Amino acid sequence: MSDRAIIFFLSACLAVLLAIVIYQQFAFRRGTQNKLKKISQKLKEIQDMNSDENIKVFTDNKVLIDLAAQINRLLENQRKVKVDYRRSEISSKKMLSNISHDIKTPMTVILGYLEIMRLNSSGENEMLWKVEQKAQKVMELINQFFTLAKLEAGDTQIEISKIDVCETCRENVLDFYELLTQKEFQVDVDIPEKAVYVQGNKDALQRILFNLISNVVRYGSDGKYMGIFLRSDKKYIYIDVVDKGKGIDRAFAQSVFERLFTMEDSRNREIQGNGLGLTIAQNLAHQLGGEITLESKPYVKTVFTVKLRKFSC
């Protein structure tokens, strides 16, 4: 064999070996990328579905094996944190419920004594009347705390049934109509004459609307306007409770549903709230399988919308 032939043969072998090495590296990288992609997809599934699964990798690649092990450690720690938080949350809510109940009993007795003193008092006793009014406000606050604590602790069972939402809306407007006209509010109502049925609970829906309309009376007085409108689509009904008062800044749009949140001017005793009404309303809406949303443009329009699922036969 000539030298040229030997050189050609060796060059060909070298080229083949180089091609094999390049192919193996390409295949290794591609295989690693595919496995990383599968790990990423599986991790997303676990997070989205809140699953208790772990990442499983079938490979000889030590780096991928170690990566999966570290991810599983993080997932396990995350689950432990969630469980501990949930236990702590349930414990604190039940404690709040018990405290509210323990305070409620003596306050009921105090109110009873104050009423007896007022009835037995000769003539009008302004100081006694003021004390009784303040005690009643404290009792109202305790009742709201008690209601919220039971809702959050899961101690309130709400029976879902077929209810006429139009009738419930009209009843709530009538309950407030005299107060609204005394305060010189313009009242607009657009509720269909024909019954519209939702999956809900009448007492819960009445409480939701009571709290929302009370909010209009308390914070919407600048606009002197209250509207309640009912609309629907194929699946849901929407109850819009509207005012044209000072509104709510966009930065606080979600905070209004948080416990004890009050607007800055709630420091004014004339309109002071306790920051529980909207929280209770939102909790009740969630219990009914719905929600309350807020859109507000100060001094133009503020809309609280109650969304509930239509009744399906």
Image (cartoon, grey):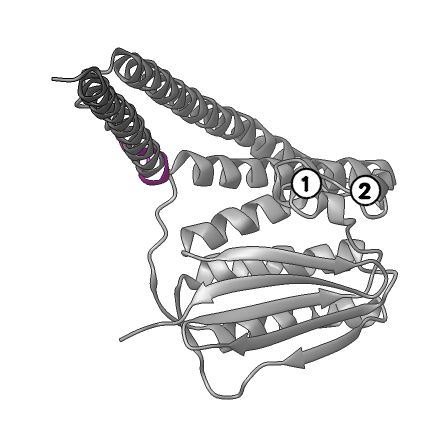
Which dot marks residue 266?
2
Residue farthest to the left, as pictured = 1
Residue farthest to the bottom, as pictured = 193
Q: Amino acid at mark 2?
A: Ser
Q: Nearer the viewer, residue 275 or 144?
A: 275
**In this rendering, would 260 be left or right of 237?**
right
Q: Is residue 18 above or below residue 307?
A: above
> Circle 1 — which element?
loop
Q: Residue at x 64, y 45 (%)?
A: 254
Alpha carbon separation for disc pair 1 and 2:
9 Å
Give the image location of residue 129, x and y in percent: 79, 41
Q: Is residue 273 above or below residue 237?
A: above
Q: Quadrant of the C terminus?
A: bottom left
> Circle 2 — which element?
helix
Magenta part mainly helix, strand or loop?
helix
Q: Which residues are magenta?
A: 46-51
Q: Quadrant of the N terminus?
A: top left
Which dot marks residue 275?
1
| Magenta region includes residue 22 | no
